[in-house]
Image: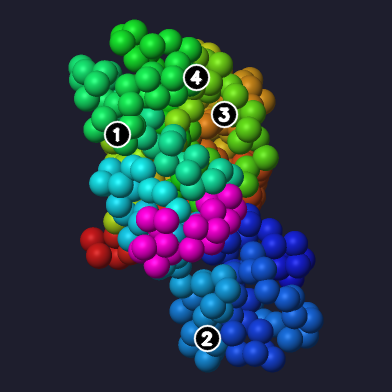
Amino acid sequence: MYRALLAKDPSFEEIFFVGVKSTGIFCRPTCRARKPKRENVEFFSTVKAALQHGYRPCKVCVPLKPAGEAPDWLTPLMNEIDTGREMRIRDYELQKRGLEPNRIRRWFKKNHGITFQSYLRSMRLGRAFGHLTSGGKVIDAAFSHGYDSLSGFTGSFKKLLGSAPSRTGGSNIIHIYQIATPLGPMLAASAREGICLLEFTDRRMLERELKDIQHRIKAPFVTALDPHIAKLRIQLDEYFSANRIKFDVPLFTPGSQFQIKVWEGLKAIPYGQTRSYKQQALALGNKKAVRAVANANGQNRIAIVIPCHRVIGADGSLTGYGGGLERKKFLLDLERKKQQHHTAKE
């Protein structure tokens, strides 16, 4: 844990918190403040434990908030953007609201990898596309989503999709949106059919997965909180609060027939239970397919909802997980505690 603290390893977010004895403050493992000496720290598994030992929350990394969540000073603006009330906000308008444009720009670059204005442009275009695919008129899509002119809207649209708005027809688009969770920020993506990706933003395979999705769906990415992702965000909150054991958000999982069978098998593993790769292979009717099953599990692009974290080694040990073994342990512990509580009540 101390090595993870020095490395600011995001895969340990919410797995532990560190109390600094010399200052009386506790932090996230990714805190950018100066790192204390090993003898001056102690570790806690929960915020509650750190508070009970008399530590105060750090003002730099704000451990009382989910990782990746917008800070208090930015929350009202993000709410406006998510509800679509404000889709074109210039720097001087931010200043009128008491917000510093450079501070917002830095936050967006750090948490989304793009500037605030790029984020807004992507949101505008994503919502305009949704308006068109729902049967709306081009002129309404342009002016109701913050564009100053029809030509400006048409130019942006052509640059992204390669065709004019009037030719949208059966075109698809991949909406992407970052969701804050207790285990760190996750990137969600959805096509017209449903959620096609949910991964932790620090997963090494994420870039390859995004390219694979784009290749399979043959559609561009646009930042937007579409209805599928909005529903997913609510259900994830319920899951992490131990108030949901099953997801019903629509999914879209293009892949080979074998991969799809394996992913369906993962969804069949009951909440709070685990299976081995061998048990998965037997359920598919092919006990020799253990290695192929393991590979298909690793290619699952929708974490948590398609619960590959419920697969463990034949000896009961935790095996590889794209989000990191500490996150896998957290998810399994969360589900076991919920199941134990439910069983005790019965």
Query: Badge 4, how many Cα within 10 Å: few under 14, some, many 20+?
Result: few
Residue 4 appears left or right of 140: right
Residue identified by numbered label 2: 56
CA separation in Å, label 1 and label 2: 44 Å
Task: Give the residue drawn at x 44%, y 34%.
Answer: 122
Q: Residues within 10 Å of mark 3 (few under 14, many from 20)?
A: some
Q: Which residue is mark 1?
A: 145
Q: Amino acid at mark 1?
A: His
Mark closer to the observer (1, 2):
1
Is residue 288 on the magenta stretch?
no
- Residues 226 and 100: in front is 100
Given this view, does label 4 or label 2 mark the residue nearer the observer?
A: 4
Give neighbour class at mark 1: few <14, some 14-19, many 20+ (Cα, 10 Å). Answer: many
Element on which disc 4 rests = helix
Contact? badges 4 and 1 (CB < 8 Å): no
Give the Cα separation between the discs numbered 3 and 1.
Answer: 27 Å
Residue type beneath disc 2: Arg
Disc assigned to residue 210: 3
Say which element carries label 3.
helix
- Where residue 90 appears, as percent x and y from the top left, is 42, 49
- Measure the C-alpha gap from mark 4 to mark 2: 50 Å
Q: Residue at x 42, y 31 (%)?
A: 175
Q: Which residue is mark 4?
A: 159
Check the picture and name the quadrant holding the C terminus: bottom left
- Label 2: state its secondary structure: strand
Q: Main secondary structure of the magenta part?
A: helix
Q: Which residues are magenta?
A: 92-112
x, y percent for residue 280:
52, 30
| Pointer 3 or 2: first along the chain | 2
Relative to 96, is 25 on the left or the right? right
